[in-house]
Amino acid sequence: MKDDIKYEVSVQVAQNTMTPENPNDRIFRVASRGAADKERIIQEMMLVNPGLEKETLSMVLDLKNRVCQRLLMLGMRVNDGYCNAALTCRGVVDGSAWDPEVNSLAVNMQPAKELREAVAGATVTVTGTVSEAMYVSAAGDAMTKAPSYTVVPGSIYRVEGKNVKVEGDDPSVGIFFVDEDGTETQVPMGQVAMNNPSELRFIVPSTLTDGTYTLRIVTQFANSGTHLLKTPRSAECTVYIGDAAPEGGGTSGGDDDDSGQGTFG
């Protein structure tokens, strides 16, 4: 099953900060989607298997970290399938005594085989320049502020990201819930309580039924705010309504130039 998982990584063009004197020296940088802490990891695990209890997952993660740490401190090389870790010593030796002023312990960590293969097999998509990027980084209930991709019809939903402000007169602009059959349900702009470049808050349409949806944000908003893009760009994330297990969840980037609108799944 793991061999069937294909990853798409978004990268952006950025100025090479090592050569500021050359404005034409540019590099690729992985597009940031924010940070995934322990709570986010647990949320993603529960999206894959909603039958698991949050408290149980938290306990398992804590136990796994504690055991790996103990094994590492015993001098063992630890491979948890995600990374290889081992203790290493720093500093020169003067005689045979350990000198805390000179010597210290450090952890050497390298990606494990499965992670290396996932990175090597990833498809890379260029989504514009760093300054122009559009993406969704987090979503959840606006009242509780809890991160979640489970949507409740009629509730106020919060989406965080970059350049997600809905603006422009193109017919495709708006906030849409797209079901698995491709049917779109648009959120009326009158039900959008907050419309900022970094955050949206809106009322989820009460007509939505249980199932997996693509939450699509389409806009002509430009990073500078001084003009509108000629062609709308979009960002998406997968959300779910109901009690059944979703097949996935999370965020994706968006199209970042003036020449076309991307499709991201």
Image (tube, rainbow, N blue to C red):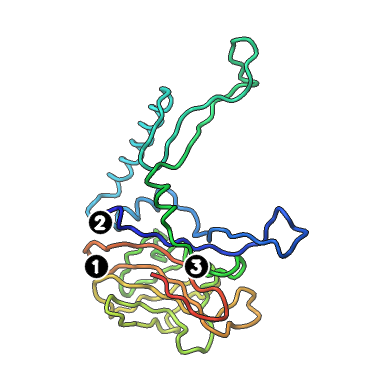
Q: Residues within 10 Å of mark 1 (few under 14, many from 20)?
A: some
- Earlier residue among tags 1 and 2: 2
Q: Report whether 111 appears left or right of 224.
A: left
Cβ–Cβ under 8 Å for marks 2 and 3? no
Q: Which mark is residue 257?
A: none
Q: CA distance from mark 2 to mark 3?
A: 26 Å
Q: CA distance from mark 3 to mark 1?
A: 25 Å
Find disc 2 in the rendering and name its residue: 50
Kindly identify the residue that appears in the image at 30 percent across and 53 percent down.
2
Cβ–Cβ under 8 Å for marks 3 and 1? no
Kindly identify the residue that appears in the image at 27 percent across and 63 percent down.
246
Q: Report whether 90 appears left or right of 149.
A: right
Q: Position of residue 79 (x, y in %)?
A: 38, 35
Find disc 1 in the rendering and name its residue: 242
In the structure shown, which secondary structural element does the residue marked by tag 1 occupy? loop
Amino acid of disc 1: Gly
In the rendered image, the quadrant that contains the C terminus is bottom left
75 over 5 or under it: above or below: above
Comparing 213 with 152, the one in front is 213
Q: Position of residue 25 (x, y in %)?
A: 70, 61
Q: Quadrant of residue 203?
A: bottom left
In the rendered image, the quadrant that contains the N terminus is bottom left
Q: Quadrant of residue 248?
A: bottom left
Kindly identify the residue that appears in the image at 40 percent across and 68 percent down.
237
In the structure shown, which secondary structural element does the residue marked by tag 2 occupy? loop
Find disc 3 in the rendering and name its residue: 135
Q: Report whether 105 appears left or right of 153.
A: right
141 over 92 or under it: above or below: below
Amino acid of disc 3: Tyr
- Earlier residue among tags 2 and 3: 2
